[in-house]
């Protein structure tokens, strides 16, 4: 239990709390279809934000093509699920799991194809290439008849009816917890330290013998895989799957989740994914008719307020006092009555000479005999 640290389990607690809260609402009959849909969106939003944080926060590379990998998973994984359904496999959960694996693998393949040449670029150039990839991919799927063309991929038989079976969010949150376990163990391993070393100083990392190209490509592939899994989940929540959903605006929205939560902070990515997804959902449901045009304005204003609150120097003391880490720090304060004695105090130090006798000895020149007498007396006392 020496290696047990509360901070390693905060992320599981956050996602687990959402899962338990949703399950309680489901069994008490208070879970509305719209709320079940919101929970599912929050689930795959967490998967997208944490996976992109691997690339942007831990590796230090700017990617704007995460929605493109999600698009690959949604179309290919969704089509594969439809084919499984038509072949006679009528169980939705096995179909979803198999489709997630297939969609994630195809997204990882695209991540390898795009990442191998483009990761030699840095900064704005990499952002432009990944942004172009996302736009190219969604336009390719739009023009393929096998994927439904411009009308989109129809996945009606795969949709979890939120009125009859509002339990898709349970599967989504379980997938998110599995992803968190994999990502957190990767970050805390020697491979994670190599990845963060590349972010801090790529030249120094190369000098230390780290294979920079391998780790960049590895992180890119892992992030693309989880984005593809999130795309398959999205394909099971809506029909038809339209190419317009995977625009660069959605890639930027995922990036906002990462930046707002903190670069390299998994906990921050989870909280910001929940916050941004909930804000978007409420604005879409509350602003209708003529007010629908104000959605983006209100959304932008809320983000500006949150960013100012998170970065304003005048609010630094307030943030430190009421932060999550400060909240848990209150529980880690030790009770003074339970503190152990100092093992290094003088009474525990083995010595042939008692410290009281040594410190009280008169060091005058004419007292040498008395000094030696006291020392020999103490030696005899110690031998007894």
Image (tube, rainbow, N blue to C red):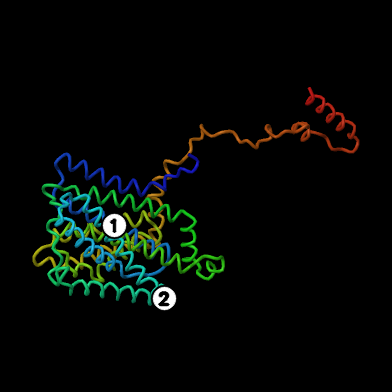
Of 328 and 65, the residue lying toward us: 65
Residue at 31 percent across and 70 percent down: it is 65
Residue at the disc numbered 1: 101
Of 250 and 370, the residue lying toward us: 250
Give the quarter of the image for residue 116: bottom left
- Locate residue 383 relative to residue 262 in the image: left or right: right
Instruction: State the separation of the CA atoms marked 1 and 2.
Output: 29 Å
Q: On screen, 336 above or below 46? A: above
- Locate residue 318 relative to residue 36 in the image: left or right: right
**Mark 1 neighbour class, 10 Å CA radius: few under 14, some 14 to 19, many 20 or more:** some
Q: Earlier in the sequence, mark 1 or mark 2?
A: 1
Q: Nearer the viewer, mark 1 or mark 2?
A: 1
Give the quarter of the image for residue 110: bottom left
Give the quarter of the image for residue 121: bottom left
Q: Give the percent coordinates (x, y) of residue 363.
A: 84, 38
Residue at the disc numbered 2: 121
The quadrant of the image that shows the C terminus is: top right
């Amino acid at each position: 239990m020496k290696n047990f640290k509360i901070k390693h389990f905060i992320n599981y607690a956050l996602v687990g709390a959402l899962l338990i809260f949703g399950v309680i609402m489901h069994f008490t009959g208070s879970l509305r279809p719209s709320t079940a849909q919101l929970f599912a969106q929050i689930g795959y939003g967490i998967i997208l934000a944490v996976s992109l944080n691997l690339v942007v926060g831990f590796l230090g590379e700017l990617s704007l093509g995460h929605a493109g990998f999600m698009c690959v998973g949604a179309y290919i994984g969704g089509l594969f699920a439809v084919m499984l359904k038509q072949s006679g496999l009528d169980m939705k959960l096995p179909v979803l799991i198999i489709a997630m694996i297939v969609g994630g693998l195809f997204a990882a393949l695209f991540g390898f194809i795009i990442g191998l040449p483009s990761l030699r670029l840095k900064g704005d150039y990499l952002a432009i290439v990944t942004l172009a990839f996302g736009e190219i991919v969604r336009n390719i799927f739009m023009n393929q008849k096998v994927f439904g063309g411009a009308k989109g991929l129809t996945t009606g038989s795969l949709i979890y009816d939120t009125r009859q079976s509002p339990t898709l969010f349970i599967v989504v949150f379980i997938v998110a917890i599995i992803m968190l376990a994999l990502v957190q163990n990767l970050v805390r391993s020697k491979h994670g330290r190599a990845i963060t070393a590349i972010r801090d100083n790529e030249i120094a990392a190369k000098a230390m013998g780290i294979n920079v190209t391998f780790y960049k490509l590895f992180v890119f592939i892992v992030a693309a895989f989880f984005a593809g899994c999130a795309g398959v989940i999205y394909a099971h929540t809506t029909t038809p799957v339209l190419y317009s959903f995977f625009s660069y605006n959605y890639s930027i929205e995922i990036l906002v989740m990462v930046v707002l939560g903190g670069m390299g902070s998994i906990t921050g990515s989870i909280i910001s994914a929940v916050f941004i997804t909930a804000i978007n959902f409420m604005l879409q449901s509350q602003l209708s008719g003529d007010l629908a045009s104000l959605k983006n304005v209100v959304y932008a204003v809320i983000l500006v307020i949150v960013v100012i609150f998170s970065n304003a120097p005048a609010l630094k003391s307030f943030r430190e006092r009421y932060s999550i880490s400060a909240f848990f720090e209150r529980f880690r304060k030790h009770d003074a009555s339970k503190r152990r004695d100092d093992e290094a105090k003088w009474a525990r130090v083995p010595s042939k000479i008692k410290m009281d006798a040594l410190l009280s000895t008169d060091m005058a020149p004419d007292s040498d005999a008395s000094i030696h007498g006291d020392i020999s007396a103490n030696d005899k006392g110690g031998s007894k």
